[in-house]
Amino acid sequence: MPAAKKGLAKGKVEEPSLLDQLIGAVSAQKAAFCCGGEVQLSNNEENLLSRFENLTYDDGKATSASIVLRWDLPSGKTVRKLALPPSEAADGAAVIEGLLKHCTPATFGKAGEEVLDESYRKAAKLDAHQFSTNFNPHDVGIVDAISQILLPGIAKPFVDGKSTFEDNLGVAAELYKLNIYSGPSGKFRAHVDTPRGAKQFGSLVICLPYPHEGGQLRVAHQGLETIFDWGQKEANKIQWAAFYSDCEHEVLEVKSGHRITLTYNLYVRERLGGVMRQNTSVNLKQYALSNKFIDALKAPDFMTKGGVLGFYCQHAYAHTNDNHRNRLPYALKGIDAVFYSTFYHLGLDVEVRPVMKGMPDEDDRKLRKQLQGAELVGAKLHGVILSDVGGCEDEGSATMIVKSKWLSEWYKGIVWFNEPGPRELAMVHMAYGNEPSLEWHYSSAAILVKVPASGSELRDKVTKG
Ligand SMILES: O=C(O)CCC(=O)C(=O)O
Ligand SMILES: [Fe+2]
């Protein structure tokens, strides 16, 4: 830590205690600037077949098949292949020499230009379009681990005009280069990677199983550093590290062998919610619901005057919690997501609203009659309403109090598909009586779709699709 160094130079201030150092290392997310690990290789076909059998990592580690690299020869007509770890029989060393022959020297970015300088970076490279591999960091849980450790430090809620959400974000790892740092002098001096666009937040390095010594990766951030030493004599595992773009890092000199790596750019991207977007990769027309609904709309006697379809969400979303409500509709899942996105993509007016079904018994007969078959639909999603109204006799019935404080409208004639699902506390107010007490009201999240009337422009548009 810089402060400690200054103190020591004067010979007055003592080294911070181990505990202080530990606290310093954990504070303000400092410790979560990089992560890494290893994945064992499995040569046994049976093990590979069952490698996704374990639900948790407590039950067994993820393993990887041995890795195959294929690359194009400059003519573009022939493809070469290298299996890793190298088998002696296949004369791995000769194949590596062949691979190196088809690589070009790796450059690095300096003041916006690609520079070749072997005193700074000595390595060979293939660009992502020049090779392919059966290895994918998603398969062995590496991308999930990065999402869990590095993403929270950068996933600030982003605003898309409608909602703010950070739980919906995930990590995309894009293959960037194959690099070979060969002994005795392969290296990459201390540098910071150039992010490729605003959504890149870090880099992932996968060290493939090939014998080498040295070539440690040093990653530094705010006075802390981690060293990843991947040298191995008997290459039997894949090792990896991921770090934020603003971390200084370097590859120390490789002493012997070849340090073969795959590098990936890490991007932050929407993980949940894509189904609800205009440019989704899901074809909503393939939902049975979509076609059935279009058929119904085509029938002249189906909701001729238009109306409202209602579907109570089947999953719980904490929709009256101020921190969570903005994530709807993007956090909808399962059948709720299918229902919402089907109608949304047909171009209809669809919203998630809180609904209070079954208001308390209403004493006032006139009001009771009026409200028969009506549901109280919240005007929008919002936090729990706490009110001190209701403590006196003349403050009206519970129904009237809720209606006056809980921003809502009465809806009659909603065509419901199902019964209310999970309920959340929506409003609390005083209740008049001998003893002071509280009255609690609950709402369910529901998806409401406005069905256009027969002959309307919108209905014609939807049916002609
Ligand atoms: O190979 C490594 O460990 C790091 C490589 C690196 O820093 C880079 O490709 O920018
Ligand atoms: Fe780098």
Image (cartoon, rainbow, N blue to C red):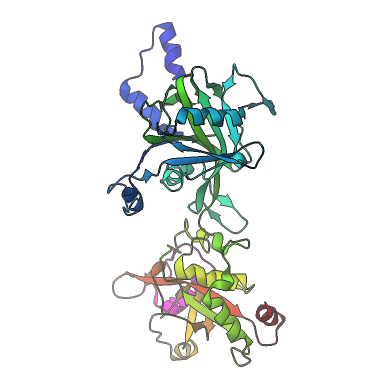
In the current view of this chain or complex, which residue is farthest to the front?
89
Q: Residue at x 47, y 26 (%)?
A: 258
The image quarter containing residue 463 is: bottom right
Q: Is residue 290 visible?
A: yes
From the top left corner, tell me how far across and down residue 263 is, in percent: 53, 36
In the current view of this chain or complex, which residue is farthest to the right?
457
Along the viewing direction, whichever of 164 and 456 lies nearer the viewer = 456
Q: How many marks?
A: 0
In the rendered structure, the answer to whether residue 91 lies left or right of residue 460 reads: left
Q: Residue at x 52, y 17 (%)?
A: 185
Q: Which residues are magenta?
A: 379-408
From the top left corner, tell me how far across and down residue 56 is, in percent: 31, 50
Magenta stretch contains residue 214? no
In the rendered structure, the answer to whether residue 256 lies left or right of residue 190 reads: left
Location of the C terminus by quadrant is bottom right
In the current view of this chain or complex, which residue is farthest to the bottom?
301
Q: Is residue 32 visible?
A: no
